[in-house]
Image: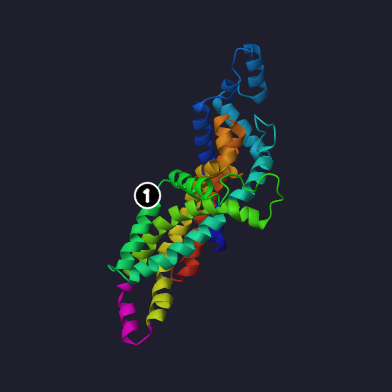
Amino acid sequence: MAKYIMKRILIAIPVLIGITIIDYGIMCMAGSPLEMLKGPRVSQAAVEAKAIALGLDKPFYVQYFVWLGQLLRGNMGYSVKSYQPVSEMIRSHLGPTLLLMGVSLVVSLFMAVPAGIYSAIHQYEKGDYAVVTFSFLGSSIPGFFLSLLLIYIFTVKLGWLPSSGMTTLGTEGGFGEVLKHMIMPVIVLATSMAGSNIRYIRSAVLEILQQDYLRTARAKGIGRFLVINKHALRNALVPIVTVIGMEIPVLFGGAVIIEQVFSWPGLGLMTMSAISGRDYPVIMGVCLLSAVVVLAANLVTDILYALVDPTIQLE
């Protein structure tokens, strides 16, 4: 296992470098932050001086290697807009994003796993049709539309829940305050994930239930609860783990839109602000973090395969 992990980490290094090259190239083609400075009150000389100060007067490949050299020394650069260190900006916004993502992932699993198993056990019954209908609705409704619908119902009409921020201005915050602000974003993210996960789990459990060893277990008189929860579910965990591993990067990206809608002070809100302002260092820092999250999620998924199914050998 240790050799496998080390091998995957070594493979991840050139992958990360390739991702950063592509991201940097796309970002440079999208436009320059100097375009945000141009105006009737800003002279061309001032724009050129700013380009020299930011190193934007150099060719693309020179800019990239300068950024990469600073990154290898532990410096992710400074924001073009606020002049803050990018690493500190990411660190200050990472906590709210991880909180929102973690709670949403747990809630979605509590919704999807029992619903998927129930749907598979009661195939073609009314409960199965109801669960499948919910899964299609959850995966097909756009997150921003559901967000606006919840805001209209619970904030505008009923006035029960706050629609923006992590705490109410003028209050000391606290667990209860954060919980109230987190309810609607978590519902949106968890509903979307649970909708797709239910179908994967239902399909995996249905396939396992048709296996010969489960028929043998039933013939031996083992109770239905043990047949399903001990024998069937354990063998259906491999595709379930795959789904969870795929959801982490999707959740990381989907939180960007939801954080923007609910003004949640996480990485998503910071990323959208950096994109609108063409803040190169901040955008590259977030892209690098996203790539690391995707590679780490794939590595953890592979390790969980071996823990769930001892017959899988990682080499």
Image location of residue 181, percent across then percent down? 59, 51
**In this picture, residue 203 sits left or right of residue 290:** left
Magenta-drawn segment:
208-223
Q: Is residue 93 visible?
A: yes
Q: What residue is drawn where x is 57% and y is 62%?
A: 2
User: For residue 115, which quarter of the picture?
Assistant: bottom left
Total tally of numbered discs in the picture: 1
Instruction: Give the vertical position of 54 relative to 7 (above or below).
Output: above
Residue denoted by label 1: 140
Instruction: Give the vertical position of 151 relative to 243 (above or below).
Output: above
Q: Is residue 151 magenta?
A: no
Q: Amino acid at mark 1?
A: Ser
**In this picture, residue 256 sits left or right of residue 199:** right
- Would you say the magenta stretch is mainly helix, strand or loop? helix
Instruction: Give the vertical position of 185 relative to 282 (above or below).
Output: below
What colour scheme governs how the chains and residues are painted in the rendered image of this protein? rainbow
Q: Quadrant of the N terminus?
A: bottom right
